[in-house]
Amino acid sequence: MTDTSPHTLHALELGQMGNFIYIIHDHATDRAAVVDPAWDVPSILAVAERRGLRITDILLTHSHFDHINGVEALLNASDAQLHLLRAEALFWDRYLDLPTLHEGGDRIRLGETEIEILHTPGHTPGSACYRLGDQVLTGDTLFVFGCGRCDLRGGDPEQMYHSLRRLGEGLPGDTLIRPGHNYGITPTSTLLEQLAGNPFLHFEDCPGFVEYRMHLHDREEPYRPESRPPAHPH
């Protein structure tokens, strides 16, 4: 992020699962968007108050409990609009009448800050990543040297394979990855570093990825880089 960026991104690590909650601060308006509010809403509100921010938007990457358990409290404490992909609202069966349900490729304006929504199914049907210039908030789709699990309800390893391929091929190498959990040896990483060291980005074939993700993946945290594609049965 350069000094001329229209926004600042504040990261809070909250809760027992190493969740990252992000506050996007638009400089021009002092508006703020909170991404995946969970675990400790008073701490989120305290950051906003300390920096003189007005929370106007809430963005969800997906609907799992550890990413949304602060939504209602934050809605009650602010006049924020809630944003998520329509596919995730249908999967969740909540908030189906929101005017702020989105499709992949939509853009959200937060003052002078433009946020692009990327539909990245695999962890859940409506999982989203949010791109802000040279940064992307990847939720539980892409971790630092890992990726989201696909064995929970709504998970689909084939979709995850294609979502990760689109991220790897569609974003510049210097894009900064900001994941939804602090599972790696560093809290952030560039896409280029992930293409080199993240085993889930090494696969050229979907069946090999699915086999590894669903049956062979057994790695200890924190996740570390692997320099070559993992072996898998043929």
Image (cartoon, rainbow, N blue to C red):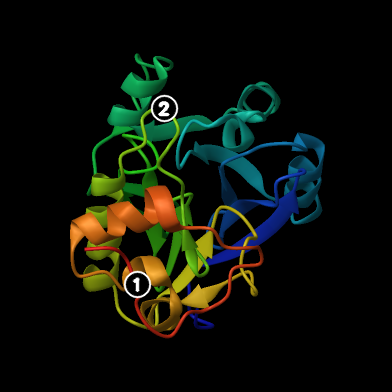
Asked if the residues shown at circle 2 and circle 1 are in contact, with their CB atoms under 8 angstroms apart, the answer is no
Which disc is residue 231 wearing? 1
Circle 2 Cα neighbour tier, 10 Å, few/some/many (<14 / 14–19 / ≥20):
few
Foreground residue among 146 and 103: 146
Front tag of 2 and 1? 1
Question: Would you place residue 118 above or below residue 86 in this image?
Answer: below
Task: Determine the residue positioned at 70% across, 52% down.
Answer: 18
Residue 185 lies, in percent from the top left, at: 65, 74
Task: Determine the residue positioned at 29% across, 59% down.
Answer: 209
Amino acid tagged 2 = Arg
Residue 1 lies, in percent from the top left, at: 50, 78
Question: Would you place residue 195 above or below residue 20 in this image?
Answer: below
Which disc is residue 153 wearing? 2
Question: Would you place residue 90 above or below residue 216 in this image?
Answer: above
Amino acid tagged 1 = Ala
Question: Judging from the image, what secondary structure is the residue with disc 1 in?
Answer: loop
Q: Is 63 placed left or right of 78 in the picture?
A: left
Foreground residue among 73 and 126: 126
Circle 1 Cα neighbour tier, 10 Å, few/some/many (<14 / 14–19 / ≥20):
few
CA gap between label 2 and label 1 equals 27 Å
Residue 35 lies, in percent from the top left, at: 55, 45
Q: Is 142 placed left or right of 54 in the picture?
A: left
Marker count (numbered): 2
Question: Judging from the image, what secondary structure is the residue with disc 2 in?
Answer: loop
Which residue in the rendered view is the most extreme toward the left? 205
Looking at the image, is mark 2 or mark 1 earlier in the sequence? 2
Which residue in the rendered view is the most extreme toward the front? 233
Question: Would you place residue 147 above or below residue 59 in this image?
Answer: below
